Amino acid sequence: MAKLHIISNRLPFKVSEDESEFSLIESVGGLATGLSSVYKQLGGNWIGWAGISSENYNESQLEKIDYLLKKENCLSVHLTSHEIDYYYEGFSNNTIWPLFHYFAQYAEFNYEKWQVFKDVNQKFADAALEILEDGDTIWVNDYHLLLVPEMIKSKMPNVAIGFFLHIPFPSYEVFRLLPWRNELINGILGADLIGFHTFDYERHFISCVRRLIGYEINLNQIITDQRIILVDAFPMGIDYQKFADLSNNLNNQQGSEKSDFLLELERFSEIDPERKLVLSIDRLDYTKGIPNRLRAFSRFLEKYPEMIGKISLLFLAVPSRDQVSHYQLLKREVDELVGAINGLYGGINYTPIWYFYRSMPFNNLVELYFKSDIALVTPVRDGMNLVAKEYIASRANQDGVIILSEMAGVAKEMGEAIIINPNNEEEIADAIFTAANMPIEEQKTRISQLQKRLKRYDLFKWTSEFLKSIEKVKLLQQDFYAKKITAQLEDEIKKQFTNAAHSVLFLDYDGTLSSFKNNPSMAYPDEELKELVFGLTQTPNTTIVIISGRDKETLGDWFSNFKVNIIAEHGVWIREIGGDWEMPVFASKTWMDSIRPLLESFVDNTPGTFIEEKNFSLVWHFRKAEPEQGEGRALALKEELLNLIGNQNIEIMEGNKVIEVKNGGINKGFAANRFLLAHPADFIMAIGDDWTDEFMFKELPQTAITIKVGVKRTNANFKLESVASVRAFLRNLIS
Ligand code: GDG
C-alpha cells in the first residue's frame, strides 16, 4: 500500500538521557503535532535528526536510540558535530536563514559549508531512498533540506514529493546573491508540489525559476522537460482546539485549581483592574524585530506619559542559536534596552518590562496568551508567525487586541489586527495606545472574526489541503503520462514502420531535433544530430521532411548535404530532394512594411528582444528579455497587432518565446498534406513541440502517428519528453 513519509531536519522527538538510560520526549511544535497523526495512520516513517552529535555515543548507544525511535516509526539521520556545525548552524542558519529573511548582510557564503550542506542533504535523501517504494508519497519540510527533493526524484521518479518551506522565499533580487542559487532551485524542483505560506513567496519562487532556469510557467504550474510541478500557498494553521480548550479551562478554574504562575499574573491586575498587560513572545532572533519593539514601547511611554504605571510589557525571549555572534550581539542589545527602559520609567510599584530569557512550559505559555490584553507581534520578517494565531485561539472571552507586523506572513490572513510597519516606531507606539483604549465591543468583533477563520483553517486542514494537492498534481501528471510512449508502444511503432511499403516522417526542427538556444542562429545541427539525420535518410523506403518555421536560407544551408525535403517558413517554401525552392501557394510581402515599425517599437522598449525577418514573415523574439517583462510585452504586442491587421489575410502565431506575423492560411498542416499528395505513404509520422505543429497533428490523416515533445496539452496521439528522447526514439526506429 502507498505510504506517506515525512522528512524534516528534526524528528518529532527529543532524546533524553538519564544515567545511560535513554527515553524520548515528544515535541510539541506545530509540525510535529500536525503531521504525527497522519504519517502513522498512513503507515509511513518520519526521517530526521534526533538532535544529538553522533560521536558522543558508542555504537550500542546509537542502536538503542534508533530502536526507541523506530518504535515510533522514526528513522534517525546521525550527524557528527562537524556536520551540525557546517550544515545546520553554518549553511542553514548562517546563509539561508538570513538571506531568505532579507538580512543579506548577515549571510555568509562559505564553500566548505555549502559542500557539507550538500553531503548532509544526501544523507537525508539516502535514508529516505532506503525505505521508499514506488507509489509512496514523501513530504519534505523546510530550508535545511532544499536539495532533498531532487536527490530523491532523480533516483525514484515514481515517488510523489511535496516540499513545504516554512520561512519566506525572497525576491529574485535577494535570492540571486547566492552563489549556489541554481543548485538550490533545481533541488526544490525535484518536488511535484511546492508549498509556501503566502502567495508572495510563491510568486517570488516562480519568478526565480523563470529567470534562473527558464522553464515554462503556466499560472502556478511549472512545466519542465519531464513533469508538471504545482506551486501553491498553504498558510499554516495551528491546533486551534488545543489552545481554545486550555484557555476555556483556565476561564472556569477556581482559586486552588489555578497555577502559581496564573495567580501571579492575576495579582498584577488586582493592584488596578484598569492595568493592561502587553505580551511579546519570540525566539530571540534578529528577524523578530525585538529591539524596535522595545524602542517603540519606550516611545509609547514617552509620548503617552499618562499610561506610565498603567501598562506593562511581558517580554518572553526564548534563547536561540546563542553560539552565533549576531545572536549574542542581539542579546546584549536587548538586555541593555530593557535595563534602560526600566531604569527610565520604572518605580517601586511599577516595572514597565518584565523580561524572561528562557523557555516556558506549554501551560504557562497559554496562561500568558489568556491573561494578556494586547499581543505585540512586530517581526521585521517572518514566514508565518504562529504566536499571533495562538494568541487569538487562547482568547476565551473574545476580548484582546493584536498588533501585527505587515512583514509577517500571518498578516495576510489577519486583517482584523492592528497592522503596523515594524520599522515605524512612532506607528507602533500609537498602535499600543489605540489597543489599550479600544472599546470592548470592537475587540470582540475583531477577535471573534479571527477566531472563526483560524478555527476553520487549522493545522489539520492545512495538512489535508497540502496532501490533497499532492493528489491533484499526480492527476495532472497522469494526463501527460497517459500519452507518453512506453517501451511496448515504441516496439509497436517500430514494427509498423518496418513493415510499411513507404514512410514519410515530418520532423520539426527547434525544440524537436535541436534544443533552444538564446541566439537562434546557434542552434545549428550538432554532430549527433547530423549522424541521426544521415541515418534516417539512408533508411530504405523512407522520406524525411524537415518542417520548420525557420527561413529557407538557414535550413537550406544547414541541410545542404543531406537527402532531406525541407518545408520552411511554416509552409511558404518547399525544397524537395535535388530540387529548387518553390512557393506552392502565393504569399504576399506587401503587408510587412506596415507591421515592421510596430515590432521595432517593441524592440526599442523591451531590452533583449529582436526582430527576425524571414522572406514572408516577421518574428519578434523575446527569449532573452526579462521573463516577466517579455510575457507582458508579448500580450500587449498581440493586442496592438490585432488592431493593426484588421481584416487582412495575415496571421499572428505564438511560438516558444516568439510572436510571428505571417500570411494567413499557410501552416504546417496544410503544407504536410500537400506534400503527401505528391508522396503517398502507408506510414506517416509527425513530431513537433509547439503549437505551430498542432496544425499537423490536427490535419494529417487519422492513421498518422503524431508526437508532441514536452508536457503541454496537445492534439497529438503521443508524447516524448525532450529533444534527447526524440533523438533516442528516432535512433531506435531505424536501428
Ligand atoms: C518558523 C518560521 C513559521 C515560543 N516560545 C515558547 C514556545 N514557543 C512556540 C510558540 C510557537 C512557536 O514556538 C514559534 O513559532 P513561530 O511561527 O512564531 O516562529 P518560528 O519558530 O520562527 O517558526 C515562522 C513557523 O516556522 C511555522 O511554519 O510560522 O514564520 O520562522 O508555536 O508557541 N513554546 C513553549 N514555550 C515557550 O517558551 N512551550
Image: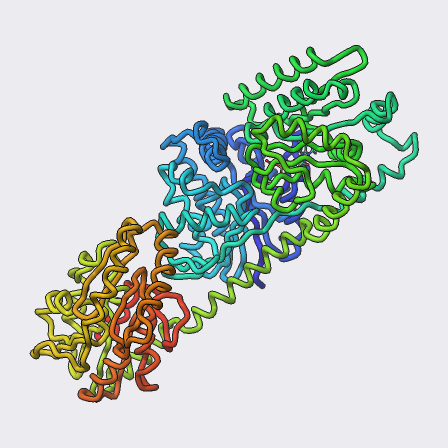
Locate residue 279 relative to residue 537 in the image: left or right.
right
Locate residue 154 relative to residue 235 in the image: left or right.
left
Percent x, y of residue 182: 37, 45
Q: Is residue 24 visible?
A: no
The residue under the point 89% across, 36% down is 253
The residue under the point 57% across, 37% down is 407
| Relative depth, front residue between 496 and 403 | 403
The vertical placement of 480 against 86, above or below, is: below
Q: Is residue 590 visible?
A: yes
- The image quarter containing residue 362 is top right
The vertical placement of 648 against 103, above or below, is: below
Quadrant where the image shows the C terminus: bottom left
The vertical placement of 230 against 538, above or below, is: above
Ligand 1 sits in which quadrant?
Answer: top right
| Relative depth, front residue between 405 and 105 | 405
- The image quarter containing residue 315 is top right
The vertical placement of 394 against 329, above or below, is: below
Identify the colour scheme used: rainbow
The residue under the point 14% across, 65% down is 554
Quadrant where the image shows the N terminus: bottom right
Percent x, y of residue 256: 92, 30
The residue under the point 46% across, 50% down is 149
Percent x, y of residue 473: 51, 62
| Relative depth, front residue between 11 and 515 | 515
Percent x, y of residue 173: 40, 39
The mark total stands at: 0
Locate residue 51 relative to residue 205 in the image: left or right.
right
Locate residue 35 relative to residue 96 in the image: left or right.
right
